[in-house]
Amino acid sequence: MWSVLWAAVRSKAPYVTFPVAFVVGLVGYHLERFLRGDPPAAAEEEKSISERREDRKLQEIAGEDLTKVVSLKDKLEFAPRAVLNRNRPEKS
């Protein structure tokens, strides 16, 4: 008889264990929150590294005039010299 009883308990264990564990966890969660109190609100969330990098780049170019750029005709170093050196006219 004991073997039949233990087999039944073993087969039904998940159906009993899960609700008990859920209730224990729920009570423990609320008890800990009650004892510790509400967490303090963060003043500002910490920015990610990419956001910090973007902010730093924006601050660096804030004082520059971005409309003045070198034209491509004046800027001849857009390709390696060995590739276009034959067809490029020499600057005098």
Image (cartoon, rainbow, N blue to C red):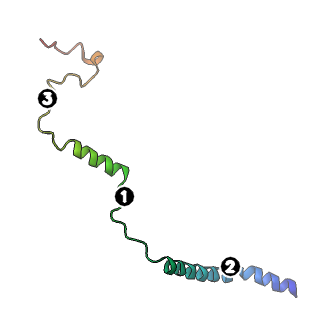
Mark 2 closeness class: few <14, some 14–19, many ≥20 residues within 10 Å = few
Circles 1 and 2, Cβ within 8 Å, touching? The answer is no
Question: Image quadrant of residue 68?
Answer: top left
Q: Secondary structure at mark 3?
A: loop
Q: CA distance from mark 3 to mark 2?
A: 74 Å
63 vs 10, nearest the viewer = 63
* Residue at point 56%, 82% (across, down): 27
The tally of labels here is: 3
**Mark 1 sits on what residue?**
46
- Residue 37 in the image, given as x and y percentages of width and height: 46, 77
Mark 3 residue type: Ser
User: Which sits earlier in the primary sequence, circle 1 or circle 2?
Assistant: 2
Q: Secondary structure at mark 1?
A: loop
**Mark 2 sits on what residue?**
14
Q: CA distance from mark 3 to mark 1?
A: 40 Å
Furthest-bottom residue in view?
1
Q: Is residue 74 above or below residue 41?
A: above
Q: Is residue 40 left or right of residue 81?
A: right
Q: Secondary structure at mark 2?
A: helix
49 vs 68, nearest the viewer = 49
Disc 3 vs disc 1: which is toward the camera? 1
Question: Image quadrant of residue 88?
Answer: top left
**Mark 3 sits on what residue?**
71
Question: Image quadrant of residue 66?
Answer: top left
5 vs 70, nearest the viewer = 70
Task: Tell me the number on the disc at residue 68.
Answer: none
- Residue 50 in the image, given as x and y percentages of width and height: 34, 49
* Residue at point 76%, 79% (across, down): 10
Circles 3 and 1, Cβ within 8 Å, touching? The answer is no
Circles 3 and 2, Cβ within 8 Å, touching? The answer is no
79 vs 55, nearest the viewer = 55
